[in-house]
Amino acid sequence: QVQLVESGGGLVQAGGSLRLSCAASGTTFNGYTMGWFRQAPGKEREFVAGISWSRGVTYYADSAKGRFTISSDNAKNTVSLQMNSLKPEDTAVYYCAAQARESPRTVYYSSYYAYWGQGTQVTVSS
């Protein structure tokens, strides 16, 4: 059974950085896409970044471009999200997710991800 465990959230001042990690287990992830989503209070869950496990192709929401970097370590089965120049509006619970396909048509949509972590809180103070 696929399990995803996030770590690395916390409290940071605006302009600061955080690195989130997702430890993935339970299957071989070749052919999977890994994604990071976030959900702020009172808002819908939104896509942040994604990466195809086999090809290493990356995808970003407009809000993340130029500030966030998603990467994977296939040997360690981990996916990371390096977040720089953080803003108060980045405050949210961040979730790691996995879907068993590699397609640019589905990477952005939470409904295609069958596996989710428990989430980690990121709070950016102004």
Image (cartoon, grey):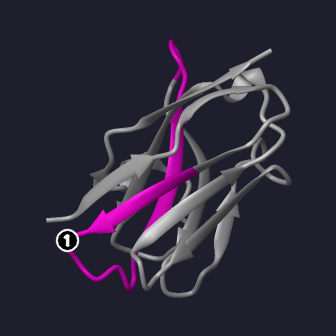
**Number of callouts in the render?**
1
Residue 81 is situated, as x and y percent measured from the top left of the image, at: 61, 55
Residue 93 is situated, as x and y percent measured from the top left of the image, at: 49, 30
Q: Which of 18 and 43 lies nearest the eye of the viewer?
A: 18
Q: Which of 113 and 79 lies nearest the eye of the viewer?
A: 79
Please say if 13 is above or below 126: below
Please say if 10 is above or below 64: above
Q: Which of 123 and 67 lies nearest the eye of the viewer?
A: 123
Residue 83 is situated, as x and y percent measured from the top left of the image, at: 71, 47
On the rendered image, what quadrant is the C terminus found in? top right
Residue that badge 1 annotates: 26
Q: Is residue 120 visible?
A: yes
Which stretch did the figure color magenta? 20-43
- At x 79%, y 36%, the residue is 16
Please say if 104 is above or below 88: below
Secondary-structure class at tag 1: loop
- At x 52%, y 51%, the residue is 36
On the rendered image, what quadrant is the N terminus found in? bottom left
Q: Is residue 109 magenta?
A: no
- The image quadrant of residue 85 is top right
Q: Is residue 34 magenta?
A: yes
Q: Disc 1 residue type?
A: Gly
Q: Is residue 106 visible?
A: no
**Residue sitting farthest toward the left:** 1
- At x 43%, y 85%, the residue is 75
Q: Is residue 2 left or right of residue 18?
A: left
- The image quadrant of residue 72 is bottom right
- At x 43%, y 51%, the residue is 96
Rate crowding at label 1 as few (under 14), some (14 to 19) or many (20 or more) other CA atoms within 10 Å: few
